[in-house]
Image (cartoon, rainbow, N blue to C red):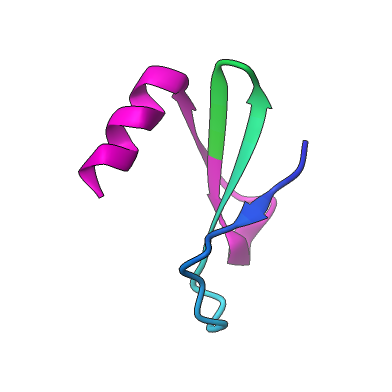
């Protein structure tokens, strides 16, 4: 699984990273806490989240 940093990252280490676990699961995490908690979205919820931000 490959983690990708947000294109809005400003270099201050306050970044969100995203990984596509499989065809139906998207994971997000705080880049400062790579082994910390992760949020998991299914594709439909991820699309709704992206529309809202």
In the displayed structure, 15 sits above or below 29; it is: below
In the displayed structure, 21 sits above or below 10; it is: above
* Residue 38 x, y percent position in the rendering: 54, 41
Q: Is residue 45 covered in magenta?
A: yes
**Left or right position of 21 against 52:** right
* Residue 52 x, y percent position in the rendering: 22, 42
Q: Residue at x 64, y 39 (%)?
A: 19
Q: Could you tell me which quadrant the N terminus lies in?
A: top right
* Residue 6 x, y percent position in the rendering: 53, 60
Q: Residue at x 37, y 19 (%)?
A: 44
Give the tally of numbered discs: 0
Q: Residue at x 69, y 50 (%)?
A: 35
* Residue 33 x, y percent position in the rendering: 62, 60
Q: Nearer the viewer, residue 33 or 20?
A: 20
Q: Residue furthest right?
A: 1
Which picture quadrant has residue 43?
Answer: top left
**Left or right position of 38 against 1:** left
Q: Residue at x 56, y 22 (%)?
A: 25
Q: Is residue 24 covered in magenta?
A: no
**Left or right position of 22 against 39:** right
Which segment did they paint magenta? Answer: 28-53
């Amino acid at each position: 699984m490959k983690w990708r940093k947000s294109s809005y990252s400003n270099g201050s280490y306050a970044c969100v990273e995203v990984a596509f676990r499989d065809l139906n699961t998207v994971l997000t995490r705080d880049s400062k806490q790579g082994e910390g908690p992760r949020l998991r979205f299914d594709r439909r919820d991820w699309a709704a989240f992206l529309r809202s931000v």
